[in-house]
Image: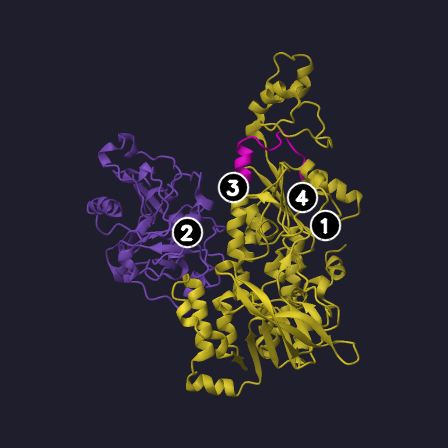
Amino acid sequence: MSALMFGQLRAHLSRVRHGAYLVSGSHDACHGRLRGLGRRECWVPTASGQGCLVVPTRGLLGVRGGGGGGACDSQEVPGDRLAPGGGGRSRRPRAARGRGERGVRRPVRPTDSATLAFLLFFKQPSSCLLQGLRICRSIRSAFPPDLLAPSHPSGACEASLACSTCHVYVSEDHLDLLPPPDEREDDMLDMAPLLQENSRLGCQIVLTPELEGAEFTLPKITRNFYVDGHVPKPH
Amino acid sequence: MAPRCWRWWPWTAWPRTRPPPSESTQSRSRAPVGLNGSAGRPASAKYRSFHQQFSTQEQTPQICVVGSGPAGFYTAQHLLKHHSRAHVDIYEKQLVPFGLVRFGVAPDHPEVKNVINTFTRTAHSDRCAFHGNVVVGRDVTVQELRDAYHAVVLSYGAEDHRGLEIPGEELPGVLSARAFVGWYNGLPENRKLAPDLSCDTAVVLGQGNVALDVARILLTPPEYLEKTDITEAALGALRQSQVKTVWIVGRRGPLQVAFTIKELREMIQLPGTRPILDPADFLGLQDRIKEVPRPRKRLTELLLQAATEKPGVAEAARRASASRAWGLRFFRSPQQVLPSPDGRRAAGIRLAVTRLEGVGEATRAVPTGAVEDLPCGLVLSSIGYKSRPIDPSVPFDPKLGVIPNMEGRVVDVPGLYCSGWVKRGPTGVITTTMTDSFVTGQILLQDLKAGLLPSGPRPGYAAIKALLGCRGVWPVSFSDWEKLDAEEVSRGQGAGKPREKLLDPQEMLRLLGR
């Protein structure tokens, strides 16, 4: 399913104008734009007009989920499987989904295998504003502030390697691209519930151009306590 | 529309402006809560549901949280986030909030205390209020809280320590690790502890993170603690301390240690100290850990490495020049504290040698009959905490030391919930408590939505304030705490510390102008 979703998005991105994206600056400057597939991207123009696009997709928080992501009817729990993205996403063919799911902003429905997908598309890696930005902060800035308000459970120790609340699963293809975890990160990961082979601490992941296409999934135990039933305000 | 019109136009008055049925919310004789949240009185049931139908959407659920540590604040945070109107009041018996984050986390672990920033933001919410200096169970009863609020969440933690229950426990020189931690962390009730650190050997009973914290604070060169928020009195005592060796004693083996790898690493690398680990304790362990889960495997591998591998040149030199030492002793269970010849203080501890029975988590230590005496002048027992019953009306399980509950709903008491250590038992780190508090919050909101909580408006803090006023109790608000906070920070600045904690409740009240 992740391949399907990524394929959709890649097709979509290929239609986008050059040099027009950015993202994850301050939320105030973010201009969402409804694209044909009912997907919104969050982008901020910079002076140089270059940069990167971070597209939070899918029903995690339903913020940008539209199009193929809108089905939200998968039930499987990531559990201890090694599948990236937590597996278990709906495999209904796109045609089977209702017309209404396209091009229309829908309220989010809680989903069991929500994936927080950051798909990074870099035009000019050297000038990318996201370079060096840690996953933890980029999660915050890519969503409306009321959703991931300062009281979000992730980052309880504010990125000082003293807790495991920012525990994420990294997509398999990109796991090896990350630098190996520090001993201290491994120590904290030991205490995280639902640990998997592809577990890392989000506060230690620094986004680089090589991570294009990476997907980061929140473990079920974090998501359920935060997002179930929560309906975000439209961006 | 105006309420006064209803007398003239009873049949046309809009339902939402009708006054609520005249039942007293202070009523003590509560009928069991019915399925739709009504008090089960048939006469008003129809009227109530009519009223409810039109006014539910305006109702603000009033929720009370008892305890302002991580459990209390995380529960409050969850409730505020997932209900757009709920109002949460947090009660705390100390004058200052944050519970064990402030009084339990070691001074040399300041990054763990960063959660205070999150809690502060929660407290600043306009739907959240903090009321310190209120002892629930003494100044106000749980029943009074249940009458004033729609739901009450008990998250007051575990303030007692498990006793050793061995002869000699009462001798001077035997302390609970909890009191020792409270002493160096500025808990007002432990400020006069004055532990005697003039002996050269200390024994810590228990092999959890608290035991390692206590050993580490005893052995860390005082200059490393100077820039932390340890109390000045404790720092002074530690500078004079003669303690050179600390034994951390557990009744089971290396595979059952309860501390975590981060704290173990810190001990191994502690400046000015060397570890004393007997390789004989670790024989055969390398094979046994092949199949265990990753956290236990990594921890045991680190222990093995520290016990059996020859250190590198630099590390060997560091250890050789170390003036202090710490060691782990396994398969030893305390039997008796031995007095000094004059009987006035502890001079040693008699340990029964044990062996293990059972497998996995159920592994137990049973005595073999042999004993060993270990001379020492200070015994710190760190074998676990336990909760206290807060109020006779709240069920309590004295054996487990928790409030009997199902997923956070207190058994047989509707509208009463619990979260944190008082719910699960006193183990786990802040993250565990966070997850657990979110579960309780979720359950509470589910019950609210399902109509299982009392309906109709509740007075909330307004009623409690009146009661407290009558009883001469003056609560401390969050902005009062912020004044104390600013005072602590400014006192610490002179010494280069993040804060110098205020220890005397009377002084704190004076600073607040009471």
Q: SS at mark 1?
A: loop
Q: In the image, residue A114 lies at what x, y percent?
A: 36, 44
Q: Identify the mark at residue B159; answer none if there is no mark.
A: none
For disc 4, the marked residue is: B395
Q: Main secondary structure of the magenta part?
A: loop
For disc 1, the marked residue is: B135
Q: Residue at x 26, y 50 (%)?
A: A20
Q: Residue at x 73, y 31 (%)?
A: B27
Q: Is residue B238 above or below residue A133?
A: below
**Three-letter amino acid code of the residue under disc 3:** Gln
Chain B: its colour in the image is yellow
Q: Identify the mark at residue B442; answer none if there is no mark.
A: 3
Q: In the image, residue B454 lies at what x, y percent?
A: 62, 31
Of A20 and B40, the residue lying toward us? B40
Indicate which disc, 4 or 3, sits on the residue closer to the N terminus: 4
Q: Chain of mark 4?
A: B
Of A7 and A90, the residue lying toward us? A90
Residue A107 in sight here: yes
The alpha-carbon separation of the residues under discs 1 and 4 comes to 18 Å
Q: Is residue B134 magenta?
A: no
